[in-house]
C-alpha cells in the first residue's frame, strides 16, 4: 500500500479508521474531531491522525490482495474470540445473511429494491457476538454469488477444535452447489427453500397425503410440520435431502394458496425431528442484531468513497472495529457487560470528560470526581494493562 517510508504507516491508517468507528464517526471528515483531542493524542504517544482526504487516498489504494489481507486479520481475531468464549467447543453454528446499504455513489449499482447501493454478506457464529467474515458486494450482485468460496473461507477461519459445523441461511443459498459442497465436507445445514414449482408441487402432495404434527403441542396456532425426501436440481446423481414443510393458519383464507401459509426448509440433519428443525432454523434471526449493531453503532450504513474496492476496505475496518470491541469486552469487562452495545460503552466508558496531565514524568488521566462507573473504568484499565494477553 505504501511505496515510500515517509508519512503514516498502513497500521496507523487502520488504527485511525478503527478509532473513528469506535468513537461513532459517520464519515471520514469526522477524523478532525479525534485529531483535535489533544488528550487522546497524548495517550497515543503524541502522534496525530491522517486528514480525511489522506484516509480516502489510502482506501483507494486497496485491491483484491490488500482487502483479502484485512479479511484474514479479521478472521484471526474472530478465531481468538471463539477460542476464548467457547472454551474449545467442538460444535459451531454459522449464520449467513446479507443486507443492503443505500449509497448514491459513482459505482453503486441498483438493487432489486430500486435504490443504488451495496449488498454485503456476513457470517456470524450463533451464541457469540463475533463476525467471522464479511464479503462486500455490488448492489446488483446475485443473492447467492460467491457463496461456496465465502463458505470455504469461513470454514478455514474456525478454530481447529471445531469438529461439527452447521450452516443456516435463507433462500439465497438454496442452490445445489452450496448444498452439495456441504454434503461433501460433512457440514450440516438448514436452508430456506425457494418456493418454485417443484417445491409447490411437493407441498400440494403433502397437503393431500402427508402426516402433519403440531409444531408446539400446547399451541395449535403455532402451525404444523411435515417432511419428505427431496432432490435439488435435475441431476439424478444429486443426493436426496430432507424437505421440512411448516404451515401456519392464515387470518384470512387465500383463493389459490388455501387456509395456510407454507414455508420450506431443506436440510441434511438426520438426528432431529421436523419440529426441532423448524425451531432451530428460526434461531438464525439473531443475525439481524449484528447488522443493527454494525449499522447503528459502527457506521456501516454509510460508505465514504465512490470506488467499490475502497468501500470494501472501509467495510473490513468496520468489522475489525466490531471484533476488537468484542475482545475488549471479553478481556477487560465483567461477564455481565458482554451483551452491551457499542452505544452503551461509548456513553458510559469511552466518551467521558477527563483531563490528561503530565506529572512526575508520567501521563495521568484525571476523571470527574462523581463519575459513576469509575470502578468499572479502573477494572478495565487494569485488565488491559496487566492481565490481558
Image: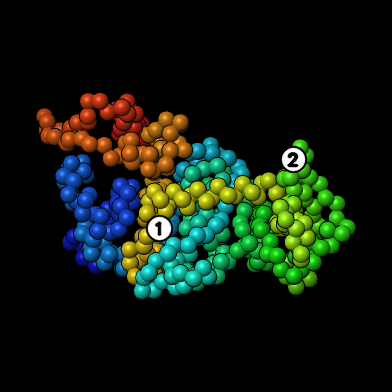
Q: Residue at x 24, y 54 (%)?
A: 31
Q: Which residue is mark 2?
A: 219
Query: What's the mark number on residue 31?
Result: none
Eye-nearest disc, 2 or 1: 2
Give the quadrant of the N terminus: bottom left
Whichever of labels 2 and 1 marks the residue nearer the N terminus, that label is: 2
| Residue 358 visible in rendering | yes
**Above-or-below relation of 264 to 373:** below
Q: Residue furthest front?
A: 252
Give the quadrant of the C terminus: top left
Is 164 left or right of 215, judged from the image as shown? Answer: left
Q: Secondary structure at mark 2?
A: strand
Tag 2 near tag 1, CB within 8 Å? no
Is 115 left or right of 262, judged from the image as shown? Answer: left
Is 58 left or right of 227, judged from the image as shown? Answer: left
Q: Residue at x 56, y 59 (%)?
A: 151
Q: Residue at x 18, y 61 (%)?
A: 6
Residue 7 at what x, y percent from top left?
18, 60
Residue 16 at what x, y percent from top left?
27, 53
| Label 1 crowd bin: few (<14), some (14–19), many (20+), radius 10 Å | some
Q: Which residue is mark 1?
A: 301
Q: Residue at x 45, y 66 (%)?
A: 118
Q: Secondary structure at mark 1?
A: loop
Amino acid at each position: 500500500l505504501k511505496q515510500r517510508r515517509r508519512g503514516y504507516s498502513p497500521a496507523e491508517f487502520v488504527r485511525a479508521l478503527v478509532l473513528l468507528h469506535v468513537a461513532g464517526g459517520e464519515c471520514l471528515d469526522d477524523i478532525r474531531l479525534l485529531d483535535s483531542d489533544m488528550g487522546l493524542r497524548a495517550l497515543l504517544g503524541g502522534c496525530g491522525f491522517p486528514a480525511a482526504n489522506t484516509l480516502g487516498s489510502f482506501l483507494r489504494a486497496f485491491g483484491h490482495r490488500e482487502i483479502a489481507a484485512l479479511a484474514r486479520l479479521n478472521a484471526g481475531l474472530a478465531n481468538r474470540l471463539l477460542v476464548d468464549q467457547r472454551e474449545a467447543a467442538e460444535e459451531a453454528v454459522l449464520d449467513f445473511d446479507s443486507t443492503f446499504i443505500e449509497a448514491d455513489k459513482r459505482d453503486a449499482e441498483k438493487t432489486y429494491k430500486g435504490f443504488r447501493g451495496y449488498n454485503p454478506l456476513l457470517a456470524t457464529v450463533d451464541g457469540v457476538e463475533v463476525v467471522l467474515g464479511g464479503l462486500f458486494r455490488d448492489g446488483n450482485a446475485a443473492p447467492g454469488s460467491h457463496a461456496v468460496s465465502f463458505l470455504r473461507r469461513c470454514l478455514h477461519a474456525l478454530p481447529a477444535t471445531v469438529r461439527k459445523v452447521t450452516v443456516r441461511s435463507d433462500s439465497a443459498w438454496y442452490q445445489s452447489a452450496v448444498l452439495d459442497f456441504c454434503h461433501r465436507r460433512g457440514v450440516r445445514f438448514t436452508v430456506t427453500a425457494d418456493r418454485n414449482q417443484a417445491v409447490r408441487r411437493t407441498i400440494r402432495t403433502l397437503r393431500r397425503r402427508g402426516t402433519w404434527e403440531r409444531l408446539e403441542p400446547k399451541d395449535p396456532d403455532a402451525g404444523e410440520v411435515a417432511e419428505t425426501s427431496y432432490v435439488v436440481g435435475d441431476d439424478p446423481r444429486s443426493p436426496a435431502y430432507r424437505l421440512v414443510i411448516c404451515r401456519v393458519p392464515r387470518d384470512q383464507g387465500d383463493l389459490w394458496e388455501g387456509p395456510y401459509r407454507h414455508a420450506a426448509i431443506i436440510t441434511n440433519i438426520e438426528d432431529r425431528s421436523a419440529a426441532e428443525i423448524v425451531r432451530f432454523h428460526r434461531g438464525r434471526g439473531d443475525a439481524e442484531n449484528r447488522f443493527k449493531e454494525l449499522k447503528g453503532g459502527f457506521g456501516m450504513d454509510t460508505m465514504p468513497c465512490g470506488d467499490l474496492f475502497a468501500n470494501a476496505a472501509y467495510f473490513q475496518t468496520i468489522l475489525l472495529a466490531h471484533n476488537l470491541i468484542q475482545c475488549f469486552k471479553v478481556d477487560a469487562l465483567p461477564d455481565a457487560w458482554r451483551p452491551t452495545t457499542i452505544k452503551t460503552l461509548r456513553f458510559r466508558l469511552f466518551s467521558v470528560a477527563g483531563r490528561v496531565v503530565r506529572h512526575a514524568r508520567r501521563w495521568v488521566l484525571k476523571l470527574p470526581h462523581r463519575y459513576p462507573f469509575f470502578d468499572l473504568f479502573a477494572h478495565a484499565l487494569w485488565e488491559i494493562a496487566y492481565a490481558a494477553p
